[in-house]
Amino acid sequence: MVREHLKGKHIVITGASGGIGAEIAKLSAASGANLVLLARSIEKLEQLQSELQQKHHVKVVIFQLDVSDTEKVQEVFQRIFAEMGSVDILVNNAGFGVFREAHAATMDEIKGMFEVNVVGLMACTSMVLPKMRERRFGHIINIASQAGKIATPKSSVYSATKHAVLGYTNSLRLELADYNVQVTSVNPGPIATNFFNIADEKGTYVKNVQRFMLKPDYVAEKVVNSMLTKTREINLPRWMNMGSVVYVLFPRLFERIGKKAFNQK
């Protein structure tokens, strides 16, 4: 599916070396967008760059970047502006999780998740905001999680980071409402990606929820379809998001009835 309104637009994607980041890149390139792909693995980015340029004949620029390194974020985005001139769409996709009970989470894990999932996302966003506001055009898409709406056992830290992302995203949307800059949060349930290689070392969670796991290309298609539209949130799957609505209305009842379902990790 070609999305004509994306042709020639400049899209920056963090965490683009695999999973939904790579799938978003593929669909965006197929619509004629020029891409800047950021990730820690330069080898995977090089492979993706070659594939997309040969197949779609679009400009694909890559930079190795760990978004938790805020000084490096500033340096890389200055190079992006020099190379591309402007950023039309920023997809903050980089993130990771470690599933442990709160007392077992190490300070390195806690700091690491916040530095990547929250501070890194804010650092990248801060770099594009002034120019988007000045141009009165742009779209910021933050990949959050259903975990940001409903916290479950063994995801206390990860859920906290995604709660933070949702709070930041909602505030940002209000700040930019008069500047024609769109802000979208993406709240997927579990996705069949390498995310769980780190998050779920024992494979227990994946085994328990495998039949419910989303395909990365499906999530990516929803994200790309939302680009440069006034989509507030993307919640996947829809039935899981209904749980967050019930949770807001009847939290005590929801926690009591859902206790067994939540203990899947």
Image: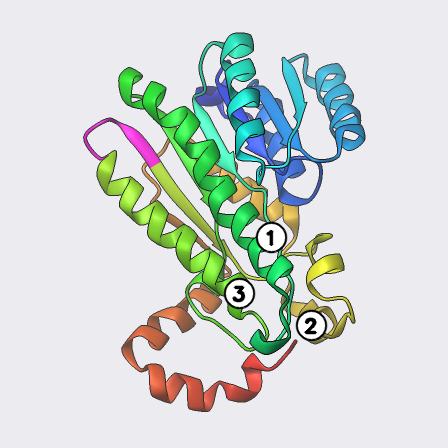
Residue 226 shown left or right of residue 36 in the figure: left
Q: Could you say which is closer to the camera, residue 170 or residue 67?
A: 67
> Where residue 165 sits: x, y (%)?
42, 51
Q: Nearer the viewer, mark 3 or mark 1?
A: 1
**Residue type marked 1:** Gly
Q: Quadrant of residue 164?
A: bottom left
Query: Residue tagged by mark 1?
Result: 112
Residue 3 shown left or right of residue 106 in the figure: left
Question: Mark 1 or mark 3, which is nearer the start of the sequence?
Answer: 1
Dot 2 falls on a residue whose secondary structure is helix
Q: Could you say which is closer to the camera, residue 130 or residue 263?
A: 130
Q: Nearer the viewer, mark 2 or mark 1?
A: 1
The numbered dot on residue 157 is: 3
- Give the residue furthest to the left: 178
Q: Is residue 133 magenta?
A: no
Dividing the image into 4 quarters, which one contains the C terminus? bottom right
Query: Residue tagged by mark 2?
Result: 205
Q: Start and end of the magenta stretch?
A: 177-182
Q: Is residue 1 visible?
A: no
Q: Could you give the CA–CA distance between mark 2 and mark 3, rounded to whole angstroms? A: 16 Å
Dividing the image into 4 quarters, which one contains the N terminus? top right
> Where residue 37 sits: x, y (%)?
63, 27
> Where residue 116 sits: x, y (%)?
56, 46
Assess disc 1: are there few (<14), some (14-19) or many (≥20) residues with their C-alpha within 10 Å of its C-alpha: some
The numbered dot on residue 263 is: none
